[in-house]
């Protein structure tokens, strides 16, 4: 066998940064949405996270959701339409600026937000407990640095 | 303001594991596919990575691609169909078992594999260089551990 013949096995054994990030993201999403879907939220999907992960209890402007999630404003607009349809948010005038609109969570939305925050906290606590030799908080800080390096291009 | 009012800002400032993984994955993909698309590979997309990231120079069985990428065999089958159409791979009988088929990269596929391996290596080297106080290899090992914890559920 020549040297490249084990490329697939090598990538599985020594995954690169992109493979590692995708395995972690899809692992978190599988658990998160599996649990939400069987706990009163059968219709929420990973894509809705761009809104539901960032929205404030008292509502958030679509522009702020776009900035915080890194998604285009039009993508956020489409996701908000879906979430209005599903009963998770409503669009309301912003009390601090009548020309602006706030995306405001409903009771169903608030329940999803509380549950999803708890699930990700539990996932992180489980990871930290299973890696006693590693400073999990330091790992997260390094990941934030890596994300900044990638997005500063 | 009550305590939850800064949820969006807090998530942007202290991102959770899912947010960190998605920022890194989409950062890698944006650079990777931006560069590939303007270097002779206008039609490759992130989803094709499940095949192109793992395939061996001499070909790989679809079952092995499914195992290594973590995707369902049917998803891999559809991606291989797309990549055959785009000229990146062909399906050929496996010389070691005539009943089995190998997915084998074409010249175009080999060029994409070489370029994408080089791009991700360059991204990792850039991250490591910009984080001189952090052991980048140790970070990757911790990420692999986290991915295993998440997938062992």
Image (tube, coloured by chain):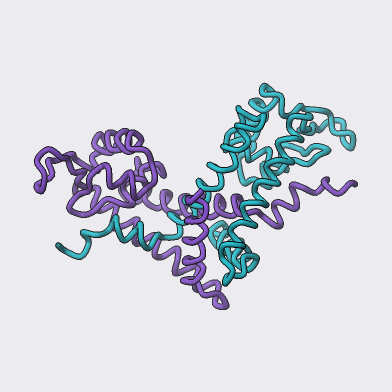
Chain colours: A purple, B cyan
In the picture, measured across the screen, residue B50 lies left or right of residue A104, that is right
- Residue B78 visible in rendering: no
Q: Nearer the viewer, residue B5 or A63?
A: A63
- Write down the quadrant of residue B59 in the picture: top right
Q: Residue B46: which quarter of the image? A: top right
Residue B133 image position (x, y, % from top left): 57, 72
State the residue at coordinates (41%, 49%): A33
Residue A75 screen position, x and y as percent: 36, 35
Can residue B88 be spotted in the picture?
A: yes
Would you say B110 lies left or right of A69 here? Answer: right
Q: Is residue A97 left or right of residue A18?
A: left
Locate residue A95, reporting x and y percent.
9, 47
Along the viewing direction, whichever of A73 and B17 lies nearer the viewer: A73
Say which residue appears at 76% left-offset and 38% top-offset. B61
Direction top: furthest residue = B85
B99 to B131, vertically: above or below? above
Q: What residue do we see at 59% from left, 69% from top?
A: B132
Taking depth in this image into account, of A117 and A58 the one nearest to the observer is A58
Which residue appears at 56% of the width and 65% of the height?
B131
A97 sits to left or right of A116: left
- Farthest residue, direction bottom: A133
């Amino acid at each position: 066998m020549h040297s490249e013949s084990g490329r697939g096995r090598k990538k599985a054994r020594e995954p690169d940064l992109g493979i590692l990030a995708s395995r972690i993201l899809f692992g978190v999403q599988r658990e998160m949405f599996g649990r939400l879907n069987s706990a009163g939220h059968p219709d929420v999907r990973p894509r809705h996270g761009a809104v539901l992960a960032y929205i404030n209890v008292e509502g958030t402007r679509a522009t702020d959701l776009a900035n915080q999630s890194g998604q285009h404003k039009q993508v956020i607009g489409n996701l908000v339409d879906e979430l209005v349809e599903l009963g998770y948010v409503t669009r309301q005038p912003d009390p601090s600026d009548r020309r602006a609109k706030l995306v405001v969570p409903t009771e169903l939305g608030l329940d999803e937000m509380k549950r999803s925050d708890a699930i990700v906290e539990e996932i992180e606590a489980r990871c930290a407990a299973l890696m006693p030799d590693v400073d999990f908080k330091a790992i997260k800080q390094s990941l934030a640095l890596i994300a900044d390096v990638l997005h500063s291009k």
